[in-house]
Image: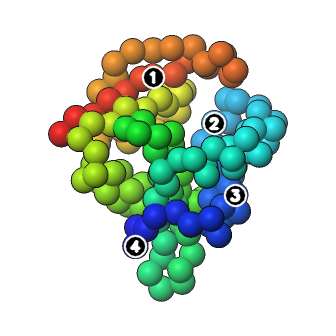
Amino acid sequence: MIRKFKYSDLDFVSEIWLDTNIKAHSFIEKEYFISNLEEVKKAFLDAEIYVYENDKTKEIQGFIGLIGNYIAGIFVKYGCQSKGIGKNLLDYTKTIKSSINLKVYKKNNRGVNFYLREGFSIKSEDLDDFTKEVELNMAWEK
C-alpha cells in the first residue's frame, strides 16, 4: 500500500535513507551520508513523501520524496529491493505529476538504468559540488 508520510514514520524513512544511500553509493564516503542525516530529517518534514507499506506487516519498505515535480529520491529497504516497490512508488508519482525531473549519480548504474527503463531521458550532466561526482539530470513527461 502507498500512503502519505506521517511524522511517526520519520525514524523508519531516515533509517532506510541512510542504509540505502551507503549501499547504493559505495563510491562516496559513508561519512558524507551520516553527517547529513539530521539535515535530511528536517528536509523530510518539508517534502512531499509517500511510503510503501507492506499490507500484512505494516512495515515501511520504501518511500519516494518529492519537492514539487522533483524526485529527491526513491529509497527501498535493503532486502526488499527488486520486488517492484520502487516501480510502484514511481508509477504512483506518475499518476499525480505530469512531469518529473531528478538527479542521479552517473556511477549509480542500477539507478540510471531503472530511470531509463521507466521512460526518463538524460537532459544534462553536472558535477555535485559536495561529492565531486557526476550527476545526470533526467526528466519524464506524460
Rendered view: 101 above or below 73: above
Whether label 3 touches label 1, CB < 8 Å: no
Q: CA distance from mark 3 to mark 2?
A: 15 Å
Q: Amino acid at mark 3?
A: Glu
In the rendered image, which residue does mark 2 sit on? 25
Q: Secondary structure at mark 2?
A: loop
Q: CA distance from mark 1 to mark 2?
A: 14 Å
Local crowd size for mark 1, using a 10 Å CA cut-off: few (<14), some (14–19), many (≥20): many
Local crowd size for mark 4, using a 10 Å CA cut-off: few (<14), some (14–19), many (≥20): some
Q: Is 65 placed left or right of 122 in the picture?
A: right
Q: Which sits earlier in the primary sequence, circle 2 or circle 4?
A: 4
Q: Which sits earlier in the primary sequence, circle 3 or circle 2?
A: 3
Q: Amino acid at mark 4?
A: Met
Whether residue 140 is visible: yes
In the rendered image, which residue does mark 4 sit on? 1
**Residue 136 % position (x, y):** 45, 22
From this viewpoint, which residue is outermost toward the left? 142
Whether residue 20 is visible: no
Q: CA distance from mark 4 to mark 1?
A: 30 Å
Q: CA distance from mark 4 to mark 3?
A: 20 Å
Q: CA distance from mark 3 to mark 1?
A: 25 Å
Q: Amino acid at mark 1?
A: Leu
Q: Which sits earlier in the primary sequence, circle 3 or circle 1?
A: 3
In the rendered image, which residue does mark 1 sit on? 136
**Residue 94 % position (x, y):** 27, 48
**Residue 4 % position (x, y):** 46, 64
In the rendered image, which residue does mark 3 sit on? 15
Whether label 4 touches label 3, CB < 8 Å: no
